[in-house]
Image: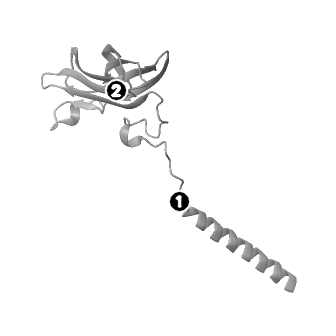
């Protein structure tokens, strides 16, 4: 009888040690993530690794009251490293199940900094959601990195009537 109690006591003690040990690990502090650039990248690309030739990117879309769509974007490389920036800017419309390219333009800058504010030459259709997708190639000599940047979604419809919103 005593051996059963002894074994039961040992098992209870082991279980208690495991529970206490596990609860201590729950409160352990995570190590610092020095590759967290989520505060300076486009939504959807959080926690990406640091870029080699690029310091920052931005993408924005404005649609005038008449529907004219304009892209504003910026790419900053490193002054002593980045040699060329090529940006393909796509106006995309949400069709209910996927994003579809409506039109695009491209721009090449020889240097380490590029700022673009350019109209797409087309008008948005009332009642749809739009965004800008930038496909960016940043070069250092003959080497390059590819970055995807998206603007926030622009709901081109009446703010008082959301029934015509396709997204």
Between circles 1 and 2, the one closer to the viewer is: 2
Residue pictured at 17% horizontal, 22% vertical: 67
Earlier along the polypeptide chain: callout 1 or callout 2? 1
| Left or right position of 53 against 155 | right
Determine the image quadrant of residue 18: bottom right
Residue at 15% in and 25% down: 64
Q: Is residue 24 found left or right of 166 in the rendered image?
A: right
Q: Nearer the viewer, residue 72 or 85?
A: 85
Disc on res. 20: none
Farthest residue toward the front? 80
Residue 36 percent location from the top left of the image: 46, 43
The residue beneath circle 2 is 75
Q: Residues within 10 Å of mark 1 (few under 14, many from 20)?
A: few
> Is residue 15 in view?
yes
Q: Residue furthest left?
A: 65
Viewer-proximal residue, 79 or 138? 79
Q: Position of residue 17 (x, y in %)?
A: 69, 72
User: Against 47, is 20 above or below?
Assistant: below
Is there CB contact under 8 Å for labels 1 and 2? no
Residue at x-position 30% and y-position 33%? 152
Q: Which residue is mark 1?
A: 29
Disc 2 element:
strand
**Res. 105 image quadrant:** top left
Q: Quadrant of residue 111?
A: top left
Q: How many marks?
A: 2
Q: Residues within 10 Å of mark 2 (few under 14, many from 20)?
A: many
State the CA–CA distance, disc 1 to disc 2. 35 Å
Which quarter shows the C terminus? Answer: top left
């Amino acid at each position: 009888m005593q051996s059963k109690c002894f074994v039961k006591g040992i098992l209870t003690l082991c279980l208690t040690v495991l529970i206490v040990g596990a609860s201590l690990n729950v409160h352990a502090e995570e190590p610092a993530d020095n590759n967290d650039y989520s505060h300076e990248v486009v939504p959807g690309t959080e926690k990406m690794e640091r870029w080699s030739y690029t310091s920052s990117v931005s993408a924005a879309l404005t649609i005038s009251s008449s529907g004219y769509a304009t892209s504003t974007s910026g790419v900053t490389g490193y002054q002593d490293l980045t040699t060329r920036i090529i940006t393909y800017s796509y106006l995309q419309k949400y069709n209910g199940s996927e994003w579809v390219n409506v039109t695009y333009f491209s721009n090449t800058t020889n240097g380490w900094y590029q700022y673009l504010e350019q109209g797409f030459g087309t008008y948005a259709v009332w009642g749809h959601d739009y965004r800008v997708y930038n496909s960016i190639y940043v070069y250092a000599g003959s080497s390059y990195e590819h970055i995807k940047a998206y603007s926030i979604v622009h709901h081109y419809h009446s703010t008082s009537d959301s029934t015509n919103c396709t997204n």
